[in-house]
Image: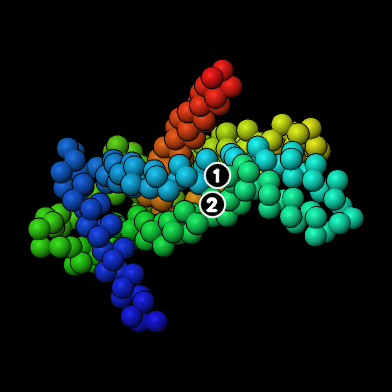
Amino acid sequence: MDTIFSLYNTVLYQPLFNVLILLYDFIPGKDFGIAIIVLTLLLRLAFYPLSAKAFVAQKMFAELQPKLKELREKFKHDKDALARQTLEAYQKSGVNPFASIGPLLLQLPILLAIFQVFSKGLQESQLSILYPFVQNPETISPLFLGMVNLSEQSLVLAAIAGVLQFFQMHIGMSSSGPGAKNSGAALAQKHLMPIFFSAFTVSILLRLPAAIGIYWVATSVFSIAQQWYLARRMKDRNLTLKTA
């Protein structure tokens, strides 16, 4: 266990923390909140291939749902035929039901390290793990834009993160299969799930330093922009295929 923890610190936590301090050193005004936003953008860009793959797989899986529902109705008394037809539907559509899970699992250790970096980053004791080429700032100002203390909880940031979480989930669920949109369960999920996770986000961030809130808000904004961009690309591609 000690070996795993040491490897985690060496490979994930320490490099991310050093990049954050490096950004803090070079950003004009030495604003830790701005450094968090810039680091979040860099991480979102690094994760883009994985998150884009997961998003596309999720959309394709949603579009296949009406066909799968039809198969379940048609072969509800023949389990073997249902399994064969379902597998054939997946193969014909090129959909892998687990394709969106793998990229997310790969990001979990890094996300954990990010949370630790942003929650511990304001502690001066952490400056002892800086690389030799990273300038030690000696002290880190906890103020974001001279107003928000990143070492304390922030109701405003928690509320903003909750609203953004709602829109992010709403956008992500807006293109479910056309047949599923008419079902009561699908409608309930579409409207209630974003509300639940938004409330959950607020309750979590009210217990954490505002530095985590800054990260959450920034990553939600970038995620919403990415979802909108990918949805537009998929829509344009489908229109091209239909008119070709």
Q: Nearer the viewer, residue 64 or 158?
A: 64
Q: Nearer the viewer, residue 66 or 114?
A: 66
The amino acid sitting under disc 1 is Ala
Residue receiving disc 1: 57
Tag 2 secondary structure: loop
Q: Are marks 2 and 1 in contact (CB under 8 Å)?
A: yes
Q: Is residue 99 visible?
A: yes
Residue receiving disc 2: 99
Label 2, label 1: how far apart the Cα atoms are? 6 Å
Classify 10 Å Cα crowding around label 2: few (below 14), some (14-19), many (20 and above): some
Classify 10 Å Cα crowding around label 1: few (below 14), some (14-19), many (20 and above): many
Q: Quadrant of the C terminus?
A: top right
Q: Is residue 119 visible?
A: no
Would residue 162 be found to the left or right of residue 189 on screen? left
Q: Earlier in the sequence, mark 2 or mark 1?
A: 1
Please tell me whether residue 135 is drawn above or below residue 189 in the rendered image. Answer: below
The residue positioned 51% from the left and 26% from the top of the image is 237
The residue positioned 55% from the left and 44% from the top of the image is 57
Please tell me whether residue 184 is drawn above or below residue 24 in the rendered image. Answer: above
